[in-house]
Image: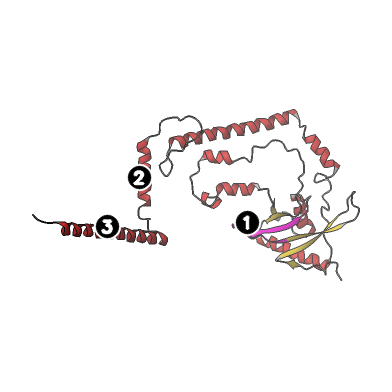
């Protein structure tokens, strides 16, 4: 009987991939870790979702090199079939570019507003980062990741390789062949952390100068954005009140012109929805009833005056 006969191939749509964790100096016995994977099905479809795998219960010491080595070397896929690995909580460079290229209606739900270059410069914080003080990041227990393949057949081949592991009963050894290719953990990681806390003077100066340059650019973009908001009325014809002095008095005629244009755009849309038509019909009926009651009172008063009239 193979060692994995007691483990199902799938559970709740996830394929189970057993991984052998090698012994450590602090724990001399090996252990079996279970990685769960299935085709990626995000709530908002992306261009790479059809050729991506969603991984659950990723080991805490996972790196992109570990994942690529697991699929490309240990599971037998051809080298270079993995495009990138996106860990939960960390958006890749591709994801940031897709967010910037996406339309405002695709990036968020709600009221649509036009976005200028000033707003983009304020939100683009990816490049403004000081030197890292940790050489290798540790993941949280039970973390997820998305593996993006170059094409759909490569993803299907990875799923078939999991079935082959169950048949042979030989679990791949986590991190095998990566000695010296990635930063070590344990005391070596903390020694490297201590060294990174005191970087070279020239390197630190270059990083600080780059950070301050990008910070100054964002500050200038924010000032330009506020000045434009104080000067130009929005879609409703109002001038945005922002912090700081006003560069010039708001032109009332411009604001009125914008308000008239918006009113013209909204003309004909009063009965666009069914509930608007019902509300308008109720209001019209209520107005007719009010006028009817007023007319009844007028007729009543006229009759009373006619009765009390006595000619001399």
Circle 1 crowding by C-alpha within 10 Å: few under 14, some 14–19, many from 20: some
* Crowding near the residue tagged with mark 2, few <14, some 14–19, many ≥20 C-alpha atoms within 10 Å: some
Of labels 3 and 2, earlier in sequence is: 2
The residue where tag 3 is placed is 294
Residue range corresponding to the magenta coloring: 37-59
Label 2, on which residue?
A: 260
SS for callout 2:
helix
Q: Quadrant of the C terminus?
A: bottom left
Q: Residues within 10 Å of mark 3 (few under 14, many from 20)?
A: few
Contact (Cβ within 8 Å) of mark 1 with mark 2: no
Position in image of residue 143 (x %, y %): 73, 53
Please say if the residues under marks 1 and 3 sit with CB atoms less than 8 Å apart: no
Dot 1 or dot 3, earlier in sequence: 1
Q: Nearer the viewer, mark 1 or mark 3?
A: 3
Q: Name the residue tied to disc 1.
A: 48
Give the residue drawn at x 83%, y 38%.
Answer: 191
Percent of width and height locating residue 244: 50, 30
């Amino acid at each position: 009987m193979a060692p994995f006969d007691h483990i199902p191939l799938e559970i709740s749509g996830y394929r189970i991939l057993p991984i052998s964790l090698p012994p450590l100096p602090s724990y001399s016995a090996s252990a079996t870790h279970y990685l769960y994977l299935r085709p990626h099905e995000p709530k908002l479809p992306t261009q790479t979702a059809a050729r991506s795998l969603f991984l659950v219960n990723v080991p805490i010491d996972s790196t992109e090199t570990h994942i690529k080595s697991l699929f490309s070397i240990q599971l037998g896929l051809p080298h270079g079939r993995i495009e990138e690995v996106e860990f939960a909580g960390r958006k890749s460079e591709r994801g940031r570019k897709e967010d910037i290229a996406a339309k405002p209606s695709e990036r968020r739900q709600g009221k649509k507003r036009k976005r200028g270059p000033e707003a983009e410069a304020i939100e683009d914080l990816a490049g403004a980062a000081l030197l890292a003080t940790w050489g290798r990041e540790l993941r949280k227990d039970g973390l997820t990741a998305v593996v993006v393949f170059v094409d759909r057949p490569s993803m299907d081949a990875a799923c078939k390789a999991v079935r082959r592991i169950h048949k042979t009963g030989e679990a791949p050894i986590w991190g095998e062949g990566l000695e010296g290719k990635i930063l070590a953990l344990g005391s070596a990681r903390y020694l490297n952390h201590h060294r990174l806390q005191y970087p070279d003077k020239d390197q630190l100066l270059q990083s600080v100068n780059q950070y301050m340059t990008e910070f100054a650019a964002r500050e200038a973009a924010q000032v330009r954005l506020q000045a434009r908001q104080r000067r130009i009325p929005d879609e409703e014809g109002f001038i945005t009140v922002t912090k700081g002095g006003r560069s010039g008095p708001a032109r009332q005629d411009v604001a009125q012109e914008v308000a008239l244009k918006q009113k013209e755009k909204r003309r004909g849309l009063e009965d666009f929805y069914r509930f608007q038509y019902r509300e308008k019909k109720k209001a019209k009926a209520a107005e007719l009833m009010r006028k009817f009651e007023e007319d009844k009172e007028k007729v009543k008063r006229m009759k009373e005056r006619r009765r009390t009239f006595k000619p001399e």
